Image (tube, grey):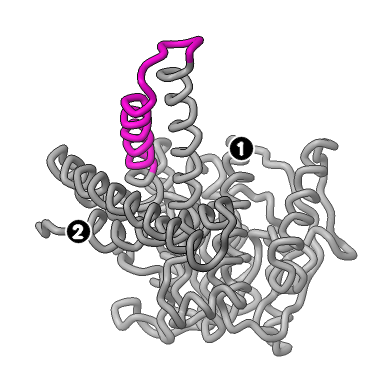
Amino acid sequence: MVPTGSLQIPESPLPSSGKAIYFSLVIPTYKERDNIQRIVRILSQLLDEYIPEDYELIVVDDDSPDRTWEVAQSLTEDYPQLRVMRRQEERGLSSAVIRGWQAARGSILGVIDGDLQHPPEVLQQLLNGIEQGADLAVASRNIEGGGVSSWSVVRRFLSRGAQLLGLIILPNVLGRVSDPMSGYFMVRRSAIANVTLNPVGYKILLEVIGRGEVGKITEVGYVFCERKEGESKVTWKQYVEYIHHLIRLRLSTGILGRVHKQINFPIGRFLRFGLVGLSGVFVDMVILYLLSDPTTLALPLTRSKIIAGEIAIFNNFLWNDAWTFADVSMQQQEWHHRLKRFVKFNIICLAGLLINVLVLNLVFNFLIPNRYIANLIAIAVATVWNFWVNLKLSWRVTDVK
């Protein structure tokens, strides 16, 4: 049974999971049919010697087309410590790890890749670090004893560049470890229990450090090996998701996070709404030029502005529906729901325009006699109005199945 609901680790193992044990190691997989038997065998041999019968291996497979989950399931008779979860509704490495941890019985929770690029023999050193009092033990490529086997200059540059960017955006998180992008580590359950995790992409360690109550951290060097079987999952998309994850953590932790909790204002969603609004300004200006300029169609200015404004509103609605409020719109995708949201969005934007004009005149005539500063203030007020009212009225679940 695959856990559902919020990505939150329970303080103690779920009653349905069985008796508590010491260590649970999650192996997230996707198209690892050629590797899964070997890694289960190696890990079982190592842990049988170190903590016999006090561990479990949890394979969490994202419904691989090569049926990795089926191969893993066939191994359970020979390896009684092995459990297999096949996910058919969700995708993504980070959420797969968390779902595995939610079902785990261990007081220590770990993760290792299923492609043998993480050397299993390092597990014992990581467990030693936990036994010596660490809340988090991380396998690092960037300390003594660590490294990469045969990376290209470009890949090394991208890896270091990503780490530098992370240090700029989230110094209090990435500055605590030498290899913040490591996907090979273990953490005490108590350090991340009852915390709602919200990962993006592959870098689950960022989420653990950023949101958990992690005290002492220890690091162990390891050499990242090239895979012998299967294909790499690293693409440009992972770098985009990494940046997205950094920004999300920055907005939800630290000072901004505390402000968010105190005023209950969805800052991240508001920033997405603002970016969509900027795209609407660009669309408005381009359409207005094409319709009204003497060198193009030369239509009357008022008519051109009405058409340009409506096209910009339509542009903003599409982006907000697909991005800003995607979690809500995905629950109501029928055409009549979308039409209802679009009509509401249009009406609210019209009211926002009236508020814009009113605030512009009030600020210019009574507070700041500078038309451009007054206009910026008016735009800011109207943007907050548009966002908040749309949040409460346009994008909300109204039909429950």
Q: Mark 1 Cα within 10 Å, few/some/many (few <14, many 20+)?
A: few
Magenta stretch encompasses residue 295? yes
* Residue 113 x/y as whole percent: 60, 54
Towards the viewer: 247 or 145: 247
Quarter occupied by residue 25: bottom right
Quarter occupied by residue 207: bottom right
> In the picture shown, does residue 152 fall above or below 188?
above
**Location of mark 2 (residue):** 397
Secondary structure at numbered mark 2: loop
In the picture provided, is 247 more to the left or to the right than 221? left
* Residue 233 x/y as whole percent: 58, 40
* Residue 136 x/y as whole percent: 66, 78
Q: Mark 2 Cα within 10 Å, few/some/many (few <14, many 20+)?
A: few
Give the magenta range. 294-319
Quarter occupied by residue 178: bottom right
| C-alpha separation, residue under disc 1 versus residue under disc 2 | 35 Å
Name which residue lies at 44% across and 32% down: 284
Secondary structure at numbered mark 1: loop
Residue type pointed to by label 2: Val
**Location of mark 1 (residue):** 235
Mark 1 and mark 2 in contact? Answer it, CB < 8 Å.
no
Name which residue lies at 50% across and 59% down: 364
